[in-house]
Image: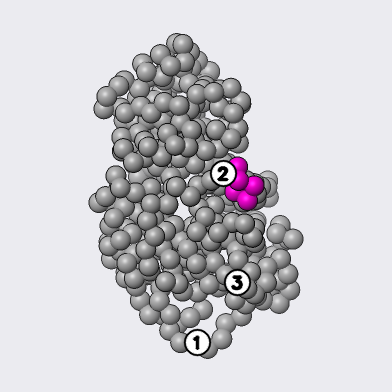
Amino acid sequence: MLGTPIKTATKLRTTLKSAPPMQSVRFHGPRDIRVDEVEEPMKPAYVGICGSDLHEFTSAPLSHEFDGIIEEVGEGVTHVSPGQRAVVRPTIYDGNCSACKLGYNHCCENIGFIGLSGFGGGMSRKIVAPAAQFYPIPDNVSLKIAALIEPLEVSWYAVNLSPFKPGDSVLIVGGGPIGIGIVQVLKLQGATRIMVAELMENRKKLCGEYGATNILDPREVDIASRVHQLTDGGGADVIFDAAGVEKALLDAIPACRTQGTIVNIAVWEKNPAIPVNQLMCNELRYMVAALYDEMSFLDVIRAISHGHLTPENMITAKIPLDQVVAGGFKALLEHRHQHCKILVDVQA
């Protein structure tokens, strides 16, 4: 049912009725985010502030990591029902481009996101969106934890797309929410050595708690030399770049073993200068993971429900909607060392 093609927009959306104004976080310009009263259009419960939201804080609309409670459904919608809790898969695709026709909807040539491109976003008291974007949350998964499903999908998909196999040694560049997610997935899938290059103490601590075997601070050690020491001179089998910082990438490349693989997950603000000759001489593979597919989305929901993924400790703060600027965006921009994932309690 979740994969049923959508025929008409009217069958995908909840019906709207005349209603009083509601609160919604809206973008007015660079670094100008406000909680406005708007006409009411699922009912979001928790929304996580993503790294891409921080970029959008200076340029665009917001909030794609969220869940909530269904209030109304359109004609013909049967996989979710009023009163049911659901998590949103925010990717929007056209279904007609070459990527979509090949089955890679998450690589759509016209890719968009609820919360970035259309249908409002999670930082509203209520939203209306295509029914196919909503997935039921198992009874044993809380709404707070379900708000972490979307970022964990990114980590899950990247590991599965990579050539990683049980027993491999892995280096993760960047121990933020995506990097911490990768640690959890690698631990679950049998990595022998999980090394994380990270600067911030709170993130180092979380990575260690979730199973990282070695935390490397690039201010204290040469990353490549230390990785080779830890792997008996061989180097990392797979490197995941979750930082998107040119110096960090350049420091990590020599840490990769011959014919190893570097997987980019980061969204870069500026295009990096990549030493192609260095990649060539060691026959390194440089690949990227773009978002996630539906199977990864479903797999993560099941993994959390079965207790295989336990991301609760990633939540470092919970704030009401009217504090989203000072307690959310500015807190993450100005006090990143204190936080991993801040959740906005939209209905508080």
Spatial CA distance of label 3 from label 1 is 17 Å
- Looking at the rendering, the stretch of residues picked out in magenta corresponds to 304-309
Tag nearer the camera, 2 or 3: 2
State the residue at coordinates (46%, 31%).
212
Q: Name the element at disc 3.
A: loop
- Tag 1 residue: 19
* Residue at mark 2: 309
Whether tag 2 and tag 3 are in contact, CB under 8 A, the answer is: no
- In this image, 169 relative to 8: left or right? left
Upstream in the sequence, badge 3 or badge 1? 1
Count of marks overlaid on the render: 3
Q: Amino acid at mark 1?
A: Ala
225, 284: nearer the viewer:
225
Return the x and y of residue 329 as percentages of the image width and height: 32, 58
Q: Which residue is mark 3?
A: 70
What quarter of the picture does the C terminus occupy?
Answer: bottom left
Which amino acid, mark 2?
Answer: Leu
Q: Secondary structure at mark 1?
A: loop
Which of marks 3 and 2 precedes in the sequence? 3
